[in-house]
Amino acid sequence: MDWNKTNTILITAFIILNVFLFVSTKNMTNAEYAPMNDKEFAQEVSYLLDGQNIKINVEIPDETYILPVLETEYEIIQIDSKLLENFLSERIEPVEDVYKYSNNEGELLEIIDGKKLRLTLRNKVDDKINKNLKIQEEINTFLEEKNIDASGYIEGYRHTSENECIYVYTRKYNDYSIDNSYMKFFVDNEGIYKFEMQRIISVDEIPEKIRTIYAIEALPRILTYPEIKNKEIIKIEMTYYSVEDENWQNIERINSDPTWKIIFSDGTQIHLSGIE
């Protein structure tokens, strides 16, 4: 057992518990209490994040939501010759229990956990991104050539660094993104060099709705990600999300919960539960 890791988890859990006890005590004494309006609570959260050198450079949303939990069903990818020809442009016969295939051009298709498809067209080039690249046209052409139905998906996020752009399209449900259902395009100065996709094929609302917590209440949960430090928060938004853990390969249907998504200036994203 890794005792150092265990101690870190216990200490983090203790800190977060204290924060929520702080809020709960005020809730019991004041029915109108809202963490967003509590300067003392905001300072406590800021102090916790400062300990990891995490800065907030965005206005923290000040509302809660009443939303349903969603029951979602994933597309399970069937590896057959049609799929391989569609993405690799060659007639290739699938082999049982093989999840990686390549063509004569060196393109690589991977199927991960039965649901995630990753196509690597080539290595990334390190030239600086040309701002005049017509990326949207190339994305539309790619989707048409690969027979991918993009209806119901919108651009939910993009990140540009010196020599790469990442465009993420997510499935929209009402006014919110379902972040586990996505198409992700990796673009360098020569165009798309890698593509990743995971799709939800059906969504049903669970009848009873829940009220989310405030974003500022969720922020201390960043401490459960010890690798997240020395970063700057640039966006906080409400989405739907299911945790993709070690059992992900066995999952076909799962609930998707209202979740606060935190986006950092370096392109990193994490999801913090939006419910108590």
Image (cartoon, rainbow, N blue to C red):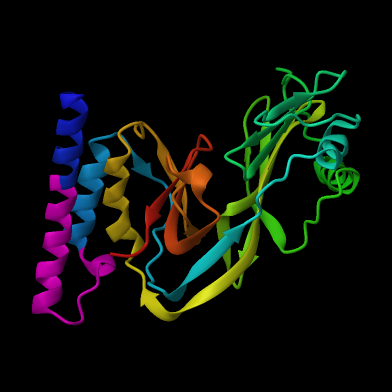
Residue 5 image-quadrant placement: top left
Residue 71 percent location from the top left of the image = 51, 67
Residue at left offset 36%, top offset 35%:
228
Q: Residue 213: x and y, percent?
A: 32, 67
Which quarter of the figure has residue 211? bottom left
Residue 25 horizontal side relative to residue 244, left or right: left
Q: Is residue 195 left or right of residue 213?
A: right
Q: Which residue is outermost to the front?
A: 96
Q: In the rendered structure, does residue 70 fall within the stretch colored magenta? A: no
Q: Quadrant of the N terminus?
A: top left
The boundaries of the magenta stretch are 14-38
Residue 168 can be seen, yes or no: no
Residue 193 versus residue 263 in the image, above or below:
above
Question: Is residue 149 shown to the viewer in this render?
Answer: yes
Residue at 84%, 22% in the rendered image = 103
Q: Looking at the figure, which quarter contains the C terminus? A: bottom left
Q: Quadrant of residue 208?
A: bottom left
**Placement of 103 over or under 83, stated as above or below:** above
User: Looking at the image, which residue is at 82% across and 26% down?
Assistant: 190
Q: Position of residue 85 (x, y in %)?
A: 88, 36
Which residue is located at x 42 percent, y 47 percent? 57
In front: 84, or 9? 84
Task: Give the percent coordinates (x, y) of residue 170.
Answer: 64, 55
Q: Looking at the magenta stretch, what is its main secondary structure?
A: helix
59 or 202, nearer to the observer: 202
